Each structure stands twice: as structure tokens, then as C-alpha cells.
Image (spheres, rainbow, N blue to C red):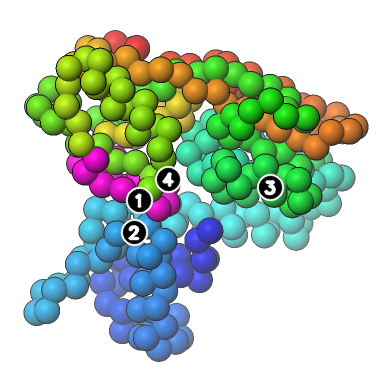
Amino acid sequence: MFDLNSLESLVIASETLSFTETAERRNTVQSAISSHIRKLENDVGRPLFERGRGQQMRLTPEGQALVAYARRILSLTDEALATVKNARFQETIRLGTTVSLAQSVLPPVLSDFARQEPNVQIQVDCDRSNALLERLAAGEIDFAFMLDQGKRTGRVFAESTPLVWAGSSDFSPEAWLDVPLVFLTDGRDLRRHAFDALDRAGRRGHIAYQCPHPVGLRAFVLSGLALTVMAAPSVTLPLVSFGPQEGLPQLGSTVLSLYRPSGHQSEAAETLGALLNAAVRTRQKPQKAAGLSSV
């Protein structure tokens, strides 16, 4: 989880390109700003600023990507606080999901849900798939929307969905004899899908980068330095998918599931589950780069 205080320091530092001026604007000391940035760099596993001696400080590509998300997160935080202060909700639903699904499948679902259930608040919390079921069992969340963790009591749906190669629109797989790939440090299953498919097609690939956090992975993909493997519904602009038309082999599939505790659920909870299921079913074809046909 990102610290909001650190994200605010990052945004201001991206504007001032000076930790000293950032500290002045935040009414703190420079060492505190440096600590905020180091914490974020440790979270994403990559430097966010280039700070060579005698050179003007500037954002790295990963820093630029994280700043964009930081602005959105801070804006949403302000909006959420204002909404809570100025509204009285009849019910609150706590939804746990992954970062990738929160950035892709979830936004239109939240929009549709808000229209249908204006008096119900949704709280969204992101974590890794293997941690969400534990949080569900502990009562920390009401739903867990993620990669399937097997048939368990409380599984609302399990929808098979294609895996696809995901990258930036300016990445050209045809130009690489040995395709550079990026994965999460614990993304063993997706790595296996990628290399099995490449082996069957007689193509080579190598792990060029690994990241402990999905935002860091996304930064590498958006920079055009590497491809990754994602569930098709997770690939939304500015990410695009690649396939056989670009010389990459077809991948297998994965399963997206929604889990909840057993027992009675409110009508609003049933509505949310139905909207998530419909969203997964209708988002089987990811966005392709301009001029390319869909997979």
C-alpha cells in the first residue's frame, strides 16, 4: 500500500524538481522528503528520479508513470473524504481486488453500481490475490475479486478468460529476436505461461525486469521496454495487446473469480457481484494497438 504522505511529496517534487523547495512547500525538512521518495522507490523497486551530481534532477520513466497514478490516487482520496463527510450511506461494501483489476475492470463497474445503488458506499482495497482470501476470512473485506484460488465455499463466479501479451503501443515484438519480458517477482504462473508459449512457437524470450509491485511492472510496460502477460480484461488503454499478427504465440487462459463469506447477502451486494461477473464476460477482447485487428 502506498503512503499518501509520500505520494503528495512525489507530486510536488515532480513539479519543483527540488527536494529543498518541496520541503518548503510541505513545511517540513528536506530529509523527510528524501525519506518519502526512498520509501516509494523501495515499493516499486526502481528509482523515480535521476539525481546525478552537477545535473538537473529529473523524473525517470517509472517516476513519470507513478506521478500520474499518484495524482489520481490523491484526487480520489480527496473526493472520497468529501463524499463521506457530505453523504449518509445506508450500507458500505468493502471490496478487495488486485491493482490490475482495480485499474481496468473496476472503474465502469463502480460507475454502474453508483447509478443503481446511490445510497451504498463501496470501499476498494488492493492486495495480492493470495492475500485477499485471508483478509476475507478475517472479516477485513466483504468481497475478494481476483485470480481464481480454487473452488471454495463462497465463490460467486469463476470465469475463464484469455491470457494476452500486454505492452505499450510503440513496442514492436517483430523487432526482437529475444523478447524482453517483465513480471512480478512472485509471478511464477504467468512466467510459465509465457515461456511455454514461446517454446512451442520456437521464439526466444528473457526476463529483462522484475518488480515487487504491480505499479512498477506497469511502469516498465508503459515505457516500451518489455512485454508482460495479463488476463485479457486487465488490458485497457494505454496498454494494448499483441498476438499472432505480431509474431507472438497464443497464450493459454486463466480464471477470474469473486469470493464472499457464506451467508445472506444484501441486494446491493448481489448487484455488485452481478456487475463484476458481467464485466468479466464482456471484456474478453483487450484493446489492440492502432491498425491491428483484435485477437
Q: Amino acid at mark 1?
A: Cys
In this orientation, does residue 239 appear? no
In this view, the residue in front, 112 or 35, is: 35
Q: Amino acid at mark 4?
A: Asp
Whole-angstrom CA distance, mark 1 to mark 2, is 6 Å
Query: Which residue is denoted by mark 4 in the rendering?
Result: 186
N-terminal of the pair, mark 2 or mark 3, is 2
Specify which label sits upstream in the sequence, 2 or 4: 2
* Gap in angstroms between the C-alphas marked 1 and 4: 9 Å
Describe the element under mark 1 as helix, strand or loop.
strand
Q: Tag 3: Cα neighbours inside 10 Å, few (<14), some, or many (≥20)?
A: few
Density class for disc 2 (Cα within 10 Å; few <14, some 14-19, many ≥20) is: some
Residue picked out by circle 1? 211
Residue at horizontal 35 percent and vertical 79 percent from the top: 34
Asked whether, in this view, residue 7 is left or right of residue 87, the answer is left
Quadrant in the rendering for residue 8: bottom left
Distance between the alpha carbons at the discs numbered 4 and 3 = 18 Å
Of the residues shown, which amino acid type is indicated by label 3? Glu
Q: Nearer the viewer, mark 2 or mark 3?
A: 3
User: Magenta span covers which residues?
Assistant: 207-226
Q: Residues within 10 Å of mark 1 (few under 14, many from 20)?
A: many
Q: Which residue is mark 3?
A: 134
User: Residue visible at 64% across and 44% down?
Assistant: 132
Residue 116 sits in quarter = top right
Task: Give the CA distance from mark 2 to mark 3.
Answer: 25 Å
Q: Where 19 falls versus 45 (above or below)?
A: below
Dot 3: element: helix
Residues under numbered marks 3 and 1 in contact, where contact means CB atoms less than 8 Å apart? no
Q: Tag count in the figure? A: 4
